[in-house]
């Protein structure tokens, strides 16, 4: 039986359509941000690209902090 350790944080992966719902940019602008290093590089699983929800939240928090200062 494979039980998760209660102290191990759960990792949630997001794909581009989910990310673009919370970051209002076009898909091409999103990939440009990844290429420029403005957004984290994806985790590749097969041919699919994923990002952790923590990375996406950190990006949003960083951007909202900069715009409010």
Image (spheres, rainbow, N blue to C red):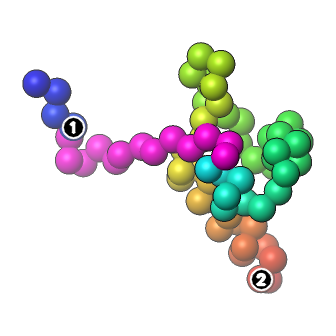
Residue 68's tag is 2
The residue at 65%/19% (across/down) is 47
Q: Position of residue 52 (x, y in %)?
A: 54, 44
**Residue farthest top in this picture:** 46
**Residue 37 visible somewhere in the drawing:** no
**Residue farthest bottom in this picture:** 69
Tell me if residue 32 comes above or below residue 2 in the rendering.
below
Q: Residue 16 sits in which quadrant?
A: top right
Task: Say what secondary structure mark 2 lies in.
Answer: helix
| Picture mark count | 2
**Residue 7 visible somewhere in the drawing:** yes
Q: Earlier in the sequence, mark 1 or mark 2?
A: 1
Which secondary structure class fits the magenta region best? Answer: loop
Q: Position of residue 18 (x, y in %)?
A: 62, 50
The residue at 88%/42% (across/down) is 28
**Residue farthest left in this picture:** 1
Residue 4's tag is 1
**Residue 29 part of the magenta segment:** no
Task: Say what secondary structure mark 1 lies in.
Answer: loop
Q: Position of residue 23 (x, y in %)?
A: 72, 60
């Amino acid at each position: 039986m494979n039980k998760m350790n209660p102290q191990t944080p759960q990792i949630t992966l997001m794909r581009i359509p989910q990310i673009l719902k919370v970051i209002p940019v076009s898909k091409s602008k999103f990939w440009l941000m990844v290429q420029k290093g403005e957004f984290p590089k994806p985790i590749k699983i097969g041919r699919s690209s994923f990002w952790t929800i923590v990375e996406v939240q950190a990006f949003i928090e960083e951007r909202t902090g900069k715009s409010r200062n």
